[in-house]
Image (cartoon, rainbow, N blue to C red):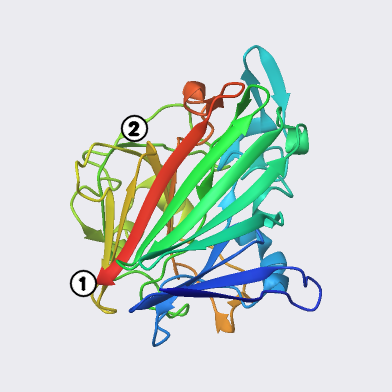
Amino acid sequence: MRYWIESFGGQAHSNYDEIFIENQDQRISFTNLGARINRWQTLSGHAFILSHKDADEVFLWQDLYAGATVGRVAGRISQASLTCQDDQLRLTANEGPNHLHGGGHSFDLAAWDYQVKATQDCVQIDFFLEDAAGNQGYPGNLEVTVRHSFDSDNRWTIEYLAKSDQATIFNPTNHVYFNLMGDYELPINAAEIQLFASHYVPTDEANLPQGALAKVQGTAFDLNQAKPFSEIFASEDPQIKRIQGLDHAFLLRDSGDQACVTVTDDRAGYQLEAWTDCDCLVVYSLNQVASNQYMDGQRVIPHAAFTLEAQQLPDAGQLNRLQDIFLAKDQPFYRKTVYQIQQS
């Protein structure tokens, strides 16, 4: 395996790097702008994810969070407020009155320090960030490492390591968009998804949790048996019709050694699998895009991609699950998620 580094800068934003990793089959890249994945493709150029041309494009379409490390807390927090250890946290409101994906300028747009380590079978990039107490309203000085690695078996592994000098909340994820066809103008309709989950989180008009989990059994959200995205999109379920697709959190059930989620696209001939120690997976089917949405030279249409965001449940305070994202003073934090793409 080998790696090399190129400039990721554009005309307006020049001080960023893109680190490429290559094995015998595939090529992947990461950038220190948001500790994000930016490319994943075959050596012949068949792409698996939505990519940015350069840093300028990241800032232009920053609301997509494409490939970014998201945090401190992924997802929405209603009214940008919650109670943590009897303290009322007032976070930055960056989506109307609510707090989204860590605030207006957080992990996703930060310039991370990084270090590369390479062996014969794996290349590992450690991205480092010191997030100051009070940034976006979060307590505690937080030291974060996001470790991206890629190996000879086409496994992309994300490890999150963190520690805070005060009690705080922490629930990071990665916001990569997958499209196994490699064409942003082809919808994901024919791809089949199988996701081992027991419950999902119904949402309201603001895409905030309604306050309780719901069983997937007997609903359009039961993906324990594989079904095409087209069947999901055609559902009469009000949750799906309202937003014209998925933007929902699923509570995972034990799948043993089997992947917690598998997406197969026979048109492309590729299959994506994922494993995680997180409790939850958020699936978003890119339901709305700007009419002039272009990424890396390609026009992007609605339903051009999907996310599989491994994390704890979003807006955990409203779901009485705040303990799932609570991080005590000096308590080490560790989470791990693995994605693998192979021929189907």
Percent across and percent down for residue 16 are 71, 68
For the residue pair 241 and 308, the one nearer the viewer reads as 308
Earlier residue among tags 2 and 1: 2
Quadrant assignment, res 56: bottom right
Q: Is residue 202 above or below residue 240?
A: above
* Residue at the image point whose x is 51% and y is 52% from the top: 147
* Residue at the image point whose x is 65% and y is 42% from the top: 102
- Residue kind at label 1, given as amino acid type: Ser
Residue on which the image places disc 1: 344
Percent across and percent down for residue 72 are 62, 40
Q: Is residue 224 visible?
A: yes
Left/right placement of residue 165 relative to residue 66 reads right
For label 2, count other residues whose C-alpha is less than 10 Å away and answer few (under 14), some (14-19) or many (20+): some
Label 1: which secondary element: loop
Q: Residue furthest top?
A: 86
Q: Which mark is residue 53?
A: none
Q: Is residue 251 above or below residue 176?
A: above
Left/right placement of residue 72 relative to residue 260 reads right
* Residue at the image point whose x is 36% and y is 53% from the top: 338
Q: Residue furthest bottom?
A: 44
For the residue pair 48 and 216, the one nearer the viewer reads as 48
Label 2: which secondary element: strand
Q: Is residue 92 visible?
A: no
Q: Is residue 102 above or below residue 26?
A: above
Quadrant assignment, res 40: bottom left
Percent across and percent down for residue 182 are 41, 79
Left/right placement of residue 88 relative to residue 332 reads right
Residue on which the image places disc 2: 214
- Residue kind at label 2, given as amino acid type: Ala
**Screen quadrant of the C terminus:** bottom left
For the residue pair 168 and 93, the one nearer the viewer reads as 168
